[in-house]
Amino acid sequence: MPFLFENLKVYQKAIVFADEASTLTEDFRRGTCYLADQLNRASLSIAANIAEGNNRFQKADRIHFFRIARGSAFECVSIIELCKRKQLISEEVCSKFKENLDEIGKMLTGLIQFK
């Protein structure tokens, strides 16, 4: 039986994003582990904060964690851009990741406004 937050589309997308980010960073060249580490932490933070926020009883607490999740999504945007500039990823991969982050961000905004 899944936890309730596991049924949320935004949580499912956040988990997929974190998994893809982890796979992406596996082959980063030496000297760029700071980018891999930060991207992995920020991407995992999105899903983790959705899960934690969904478990809160008070509306203000839920919103707080959903805002943190949204902030982590936007943090990933700048990391992805830097990865592209450092030629660790292609323009195409960068665009795909940014599109996913945009969608996650919009979904989180919807949760914040709804909850």
Image (tube, rainbow, N blue to C red):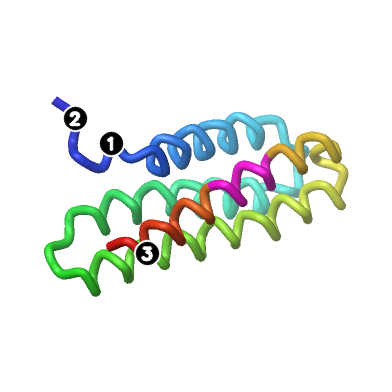
Label 3 to label 1: alpha-carbon separation: 17 Å
Q: Which amino acid is tagged 2?
A: Pro
Label 2 to label 1: alpha-carbon separation: 6 Å
Mark 3 — residue? 112
- 24 sits to left or right of 18: right
- 33 sits to left or right of 85: left
User: Closer to the camera: disc 3 or disc 1?
Assistant: 3
Mark 1 — residue? 6
Q: Quadrant of the N terminus?
A: top left
* Residue 73 percent location from the top left of the image: 54, 56
Tag of residue 2 = 2
Q: Is residue 99 magenta?
A: yes
User: Closer to the camera: disc 2 or disc 3?
Assistant: 3
Quarter of the image for residue 28 reads top right
Mark 2, secondary structure of its residue: loop
Q: Residue at x 63, y 46 (%)?
A: 36
